[in-house]
Image (cartoon, rainbow, N blue to C red):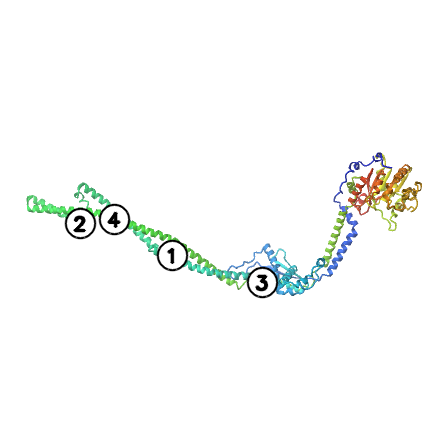
């Protein structure tokens, strides 16, 4: 009979509102769920871990013993002062950066190359790349997959320089250099299969490092000495040229100036003194001349007689006074015409004429003196101007001379400094001290340092355990199985009606546990969980109750047959008749589960019209209810289920029985269940815990929703083991009545 609207009224409202959409799997961090995943896959995890340990042990057997030799050097910050001279390369100012640089220097291919050449490691069997040796598991498989030629065959065709670089790289991988704590000590460790060779290489590395420090200083000192010698030759020529320039310029300056600067300055001082005197004389002469000419203009020569003096004038004036006195004496006794008086008058006239002539001569002499002093002053000024120009030129030349002298002095000073430094560096060339010293030489190791088998096996075990756990979680993530009711509800947007525990079965009879459950008089945890389904389906407050209940699953082996049988058992009540129909025509298993005979009342025969309905229904004494089940599988199961015969059968038996439980085929990839869904009032989807993936459940639910008149009322989480996280929460294995 088809489901009617009133038979669907009890359906959960949440599913009614959300059947058109399905949510994605619920994602959360569930520690118990993670523990459950690990516990369920414990055997796989142990198997992978043991496999890793075995492979690691096998790999260890192929590894030769390895010895480690240790040597140490210390960066010495103390300075040995043999001479007060400063060294070409100063001592190290040790810092963290300097230490790191020295460590890199020790591991550099230059220093390691010297060790290789020193010990001839290119021809040593342990390092010679031309010697065949086991490359290791991964290189071996890589070479096997790529088909490349073995490395020792390739090395035989390589030039010596390339072989040396291969050996240098191989040796660098075996050398470990590190700082010891916070000290200035650098520890050097060398690993080798030969203990004597390990110690020899370690000591060679320390010696080459010390030698490299000394070589660096020696080379730098020699380079500086050569540069200083070349520079001294240049400076010697420059000093000589500077001195010659000073001498030549000084001689030329004296020749051009007519004397030295001191002579010119002295001459200029004398000329200035003479100019002052000449200027004074000219001024005096001009004043006297102006006075005389003024008197001469006012009173004639007689007026200037008192101003101008000379010995001749004084003599003439004395003579005139005597003669005048004589004339005065003779005038009283002699007349004016007396010859004596005439003679005296003539003498007086001659003296006056002489005085006038002398005065005129003196006036002219004053004028001449003014002209002479003026000319002298002009000449002195001209001479002073010439001498001043010579002094200025001499001053300018003195500045240039000073520059030449300073240049010569500076060049000489540089030359002397370079000469001093050259002598110092030549003294240092024969004595160089390194900034490091060896404090521990390597001794031949006795006990192998590797491989560390215990640590290696422990690491292998940890790696295997991590790989196994990662693989388990990755596989679980890819599968994304439903592990608890919350995920199932979030996934399907349907109520989860029950969580059924897993009950173990015997190896010979997988249905032994079901037979035990069905035969038990007292309720077990499994049956109590099935009763919860009955309570949910036939809740009085939900109105119309379903009559035809179909139970299906996404894929086989999800417990739908066990659920169908146990649900039919718990539905049996006084005055209530129950019928169970095994509609799985492809893999019928209810007869075997209920321990019923394999012949008689075959549903396939009925659908094919070979038997009547009264011969179809059989009685199961184990649970006390009627059963309709196939005796054999059918190849055309979909055609038989789609025929009206099955629909008529369900319609007729629904009038006779109070409740009908249909065990349907799995939903995924089959259309049988879709045909049966429209004939049922309610459909339950069984989902196996931690087995069925979310994608499979989603796809199955989509297929059921596409069926006409399908009514999926809820889900049932089956086969929940003790190791599953939700079994502890629900306490389904410990509950007792």
Q: Secondary structure at mark 1?
A: helix
Q: Along the line of sight, which residue is nearer the eye, 55 or 217?
A: 55
For the residues carrying marks 1 and 3, which lies nearer the camera in this image? 1
Q: Residue at x 77, y 44 (%)?
A: 695
Q: Give x and y (percent) for residue 590.
A: 88, 45
Query: Mark 3 or mark 2: which is in front?
Result: 3
Q: CA distance from mark 4 to mark 1?
A: 41 Å
Residue 124 falls left or right of residue 373: right
Distance, label 3 to label 2, CA atoms, is: 112 Å
Q: Secondary structure at mark 4?
A: helix
Q: Categorize mark 3 by other alpha carbons within 10 Å: few (<14), some (14-19), many (20+).
A: some
Q: Which mark is residue 373?
A: 4
Q: Earlier in the sequence, mark 3 or mark 2?
A: 3
Q: Which residue is mark 3?
A: 211
The reply to whether callout 2 and callout 1 are in contact (CB within 8 Å) is no
Query: Which mark sits nearer the N-terminus, 1 or 3?
Result: 3
Mark number, residue 311:
2
């Amino acid at each position: 009979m088809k489901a009617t609207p009133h038979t669907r009224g009890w359906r959960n409202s949440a599913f009614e509102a959300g059947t058109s959409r399905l949510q994605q799997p619920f994602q959360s961090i569930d520690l118990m769920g993670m523990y459950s995943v690990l516990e369920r896959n414990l055997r796989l995890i142990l198997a992978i871990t043991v496999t890793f340990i075995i492979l690691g042990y096998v790999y260890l057997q192929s590894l030769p013993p390895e010895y480690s030799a240790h040597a140490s050097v210390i960066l010495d910050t103390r300075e040995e002062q043999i001479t007060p001279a400063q060294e070409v390369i100063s001592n190290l100012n040790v810092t963290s950066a300097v230490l790191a640089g020295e460590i890199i220097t020790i591991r550099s291919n230059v220093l390691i190359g010297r060790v290789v050449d020193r010990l001839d490691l290119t021809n040593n069997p342990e390092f010679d790349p031309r010697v065949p040796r086991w490359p290791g598991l991964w290189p071996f498989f890589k070479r096997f997959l790529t088909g490349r030629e073995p490395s020792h065959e390739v090395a035989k065709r390589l030039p010596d320089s390339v072989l040396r670089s291969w050996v240098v790289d191989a040796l660098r991988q075996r050398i470990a250099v590190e700082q010891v704590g916070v000290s200035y000590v650098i520890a050097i460790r060398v690993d080798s299969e030969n203990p004597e060779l390990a110690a020899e290489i370690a000591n060679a590395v320390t010696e080459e490092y010390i030698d490299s420090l000394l070589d660096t200083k020696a080379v730098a000192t020699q380079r500086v000495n050569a540069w200083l010698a070349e520079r001294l030759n240049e400076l010697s020529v420059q000093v000589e040229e500077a001195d010659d320039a000073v001498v030549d310029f000084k001689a030329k300056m004296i020749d051009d100036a007519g004397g030295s600067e001191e002579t010119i300055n002295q001459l200029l001082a004398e000329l200035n003194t003479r100019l002052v005197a000449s200027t004074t004389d000219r001024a005096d002469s001009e004043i006297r001349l102006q006075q005389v000419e003024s008197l001469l203009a006012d009173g004639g020569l007689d007026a200037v007689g008192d101003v101008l003096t000379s010995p001749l004038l004084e003599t003439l004036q004395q003579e005139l006074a005597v003669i005048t006195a004589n004339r005065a004496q003779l005038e009283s006794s002699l007349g004016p015409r007396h010859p004596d008086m005439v003679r005296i008058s003539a003498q007086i006239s001659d003296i006056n004429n002489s005085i006038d002539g002398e005065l005129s001569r003196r006036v002219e002499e004053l004028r001449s003196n003014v002209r002479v002093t003026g000319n002298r002053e002009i000449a002195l000024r001209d001479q002073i101007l010439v001498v001043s120009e010579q002094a200025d030129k001499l001053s300018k030349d003195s500045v240039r001379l000073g520059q030449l002298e300073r240049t010569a002095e500076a060049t000489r000073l540089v030359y002397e400094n370079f000469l001093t430094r050259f002598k110092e560096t030549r003294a240092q060339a024969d004595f160089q001290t390194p900034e490091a010293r060896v404090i521990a030489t390597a001794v031949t190791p006795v006990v192998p340092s590797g491989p560390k088998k215990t640590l290696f096996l422990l690491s292998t075990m940890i790696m295997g355990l991590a790989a196994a756990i990662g693989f388990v979680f990755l596989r679980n993530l890819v599968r994304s199985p439903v592990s608890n009711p919350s995920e199932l509800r979030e996934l399907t947007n349907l109520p989860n009606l029950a969580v059924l525990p897993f009950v173990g079965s015997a190896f010979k009879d997988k249905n032994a546990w079901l037979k035990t459950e069905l035969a038990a008089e007292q309720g077990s945890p499994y049956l109590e969980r099935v009763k919860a389904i009955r309570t949910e389906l036939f809740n009085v407050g939900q109105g119309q109750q379903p009559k035809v209940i179909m139970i299906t699953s996404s894929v086989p082996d999800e417990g739908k047959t066990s659920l169908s049988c146990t649900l039919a058992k718990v539905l049996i009540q006084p005055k209530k008749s129950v019928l169970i129909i095994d509609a799985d025509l492809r893999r019928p298993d209810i007869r075997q589960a209920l321990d019923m005979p394999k012949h008689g009342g075959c549903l396939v025969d009925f659908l094919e019209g070979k038997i009547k309905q009264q011969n179809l229904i059989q009685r199961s004494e184990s649970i006390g209810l009627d059963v309709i089940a196939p005796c054999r599988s059918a190849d055309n199961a979909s055609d038989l289920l789609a025929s009206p015969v099955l629909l008529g059968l369900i319609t007729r038996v629904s009038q006779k029985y109070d409740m009908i439980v249909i065990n349907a085929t799995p939903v995924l990839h089959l259309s049988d269940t879709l045909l049966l869904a429209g004939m049922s009032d309610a459909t339950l989807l069984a989902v196996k815990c931690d087995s069925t993936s979310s994608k499979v459940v989603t796809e199955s639910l989509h297929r059921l929703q596409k069926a006409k008149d399908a009514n999926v009322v809820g889900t049932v989480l089956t086969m929940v083991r003790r190791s599953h996280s939700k079994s502890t929460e629900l306490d389904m294995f410990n509950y007792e009545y």
